[in-house]
Image (tube, helix red, strand yellow):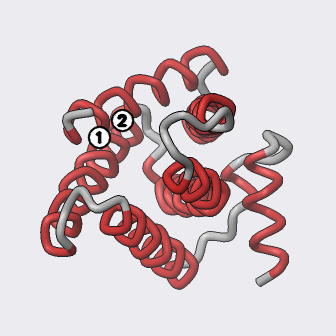
Amino acid sequence: MNAIIQLFWQICRLRTGPDAVPTSSVLLIFTGLLYSGLNLFVWVWAGQESLLQASGTLAMVTGGWLLVLWGIMLLMGKKERYQQTLTALFGVNIILVLISVPLRFVADSLGEASALRMPLAFMLIGLFVWGVFIEGFIYHRALDISPLQGNLMALAMSMGIMALLGN
């Protein structure tokens, strides 16, 4: 398990790509369930939606994301890399959520007038930007496209997800 966590951390640091992720249905299911569970927890904890609403929203957003990615990989003739790519995406998103939750918790517990709210907000924005670059790196490596194309694809996917969420 430690080796898998280290692998996802290395992907977060842009040191290795999704090609290093083992092709394993069990690992894909495990990371997918952990990704879903963590995101449900965060959405319900944030108090914006009930568990049922959050589950529906997560299913819609994740399903759309994975369907678009499947279509792109199919069009580019890279569908054999889909499982590894998904596992890598789920794994790095788990790490990013685990980093962001404490920051969000501290930011939410501070009063509006707190001097720490602004630095925490910038840290969360930085974490989002880092996440876009990580996903761009994964797309770059999985699809054999340029780093710029991978980053633009990640940004487009992120903007699409935010549009679906109404943010």
* Camera-side residue of 23 and 150: 150
The quarter of the image holding the C terminus is top left
The residue sitting at 20% across, 61% down in the picture is 49
* Camera-side residue of 147 and 110: 110
Q: Which residue matches tag 1?
A: 68
Q: Are marks 2 and 1 in contact (CB under 8 Å)?
A: yes
The quarter of the image holding the N terminus is bottom right
Whether residue 147 is visible to the viewer of this picture, yes or no, is: yes
Q: For residue 145, which numbered disc appears in the image?
A: none
Q: Which residue matches tag 2?
A: 72
Q: Where is residue 47 in the image (x, y as percent from the top left)?
A: 28, 62
* Camera-side residue of 101 and 62: 101
Above or below, 138 against 76 in this view is: below
Question: In the picture provided, is 119 more to the left or to the right than 64?
Answer: right
The three-letter amino acid code for the residue at tag 1 is Val
The three-letter amino acid code for the residue at tag 2 is Ile
